[in-house]
Image: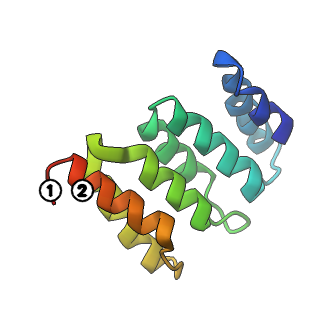
Amino acid sequence: FFYLAEAGDEGSTWRLAIEGAAQVQRLGMDLDLQFVNRVVTQYSDSARWEEALSFVQTTSTAAFVPGQVTFNTLISGCGSSRWEWSARLAHCMQGARLEADSFTSTAVIRALSSGGAW
């Protein structure tokens, strides 16, 4: 299924990855972190950060826990249009016992600055 997510680099075919993820879940299989991160990146690159958040929420299970890359992609995807979510997600990272790295800090600062909250 990772290759379906990779296909998203070519226009709207990234929807195949979303459909593939739904099919995997219907079959009772677990999604791996690399696949989820790729789908989240596709959503974020398409300025569909709300759908990216929803996707992560619905795929989070005991077998899949969002990682640092997942959070960083979501924070960056929210950007200045929803700086509040960028800040909230950075806070959620702490709750998940994930440390913010320089990418996290830069993305949050950029979102706060662009959103006029800095």
Is 86 or 62 nearer to us in this picture? 86
Q: Quadrant of residue 105?
A: bottom left
What residue would you read off at disc 2? 112
Which of pointers 1 and 2 lies earlier in the amino acid sequence?
Answer: 2
Report which quarter residue 94 is drawn in: bottom left
Residue 9 position, x and y percent, is 70, 27
Say above or below: 20 vs 106: above
Q: Residue 24's x, y, as percent?
A: 80, 41
Task: Please tell me the numbered disc located at residue 117.
Answer: 1
Q: Is residue 13 left or right of residue 92?
A: right
| Badge 1 vs badge 2, beta-carbon distance below 8 Å | yes
Residue 26 percent location from the top left of the image: 76, 39
Q: Nearer the viewer, residue 8 or 112?
A: 112
In the figure, is residue 57 to the left or right of 6?
left
Residue 79 at what x, y percent from top left?
35, 46
Q: Quadrant of residue 107?
A: bottom left
Looking at numbered disc 2 in the image, what kind of residue is underneath it?
A: Leu
Whole-Å distance between the Cαs marked 1 and 2?
5 Å
